[in-house]
Image: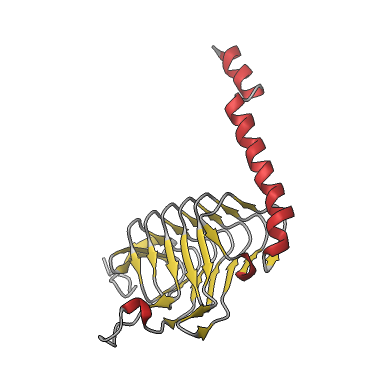
Amino acid sequence: MSKFLHFLKQNPSPYDKSHTLTRLWHEKKTSLWYHIFLKECGKHNIILPPLYITPENVILENNVLIWQNARIEGVKTYEGVKYDPIIIFRNNVSVQQNLHLTCATKIEIGKNTAIAANVSITDINHPYDDIQKPIEKQPITTMSVCIGEDCKIYNNTVILPGVTIGKHCIIGANSVVKGNFPDYSVIVGAPAKIVKRFSFEKQAWLKTTSDGSFIEI
């Protein structure tokens, strides 16, 4: 058995070889094809086939991985109003399948942040003040979004306009995130609230109230 396991380690399966070749192909395609159209593109980035992308609004630093079926859209005009969107993926950001990202001002994702499947991020809000017009026909409002470095955002999270997330934060699955959150927070729920923060005094993750204050035990 040990010889067989050693053989497998030394001889990757055809699937593993195919997977490696696929990644290399998409890295090369990103560097040669998307590089022409992206606003900026660093090294060793991989974009797998997207659902929709406006590359002229997108900056990739280095080692960014974006899996299949992403919608990464810069909205340049809406109901006659022009916008100048910018979407930034910092170094080593990884994004799993089915990202839905729409931007009219600015969305920035910090370095080393990992985004799981089916996450939505937008800096656009659709007002419904005028009841004589369909909501989709009313002018949008916008507030930029900033996601800090070293974060982990789990499946099906929705990040709304105006959100600022500090560094090294965890966003639980199915959360709906609105507001500002400090560094080293665990954020969960709909609407999302802080449930833990890292205490440098105690050198531990401690439970908090929803506003992030440590609970005395």
Task: Using the image as rendered, state which of residue 183 and residue 154 is in the foreground.
Answer: 154
Task: Kindly identify the residue that appears in the image at 59 percent across and 62 percent down.
Answer: 111
- Percent from the top left, x then y, of residue 1? 54, 11
Image quadrant occupied by the C terminus: bottom left
- Percent from the top left, x then y, of residue 28? 72, 48
On screen, 67 above or below 9?
A: below
Q: Quadrant of residue 106?
A: bottom right
Task: Kindly identify the residue that appears in the image at 59 percent across and 68 percent down.
Answer: 88
Task: Using the image as rendered, state which of residue 79 and residue 96 is in the foreground.
Answer: 79
Say whether residue 138 is left or right of residue 14. Answer: left
Report the colour scheme: secondary structure
Task: Using the image as rendered, state which of residue 110 and residue 68 is in the foreground.
Answer: 68
Q: Can I make out residue 41 in this image? A: no
- Total labels: the figure holds 0
Task: Using the image as rendered, state which of residue 217 and residue 174 is in the foreground.
Answer: 174
Say whether residue 27 is left or right of residue 201. Answer: right
Q: Can I make out residue 49 in this image? A: yes
On screen, 163 above or below 3?
A: below
On screen, 180 above or below 185?
A: below
Say whether residue 36 is left or right of residue 119. Answer: right
- Percent from the top left, x then y, of residue 87? 57, 70
- Percent from the top left, x then y, of residue 115? 48, 56
Task: Kindly identify the residue that appears in the image at 29 percent across and 82 percent down.
Answer: 128
Task: Kindly identify the residue that appears in the image at 63 percent across and 25 percent down.
Answer: 12
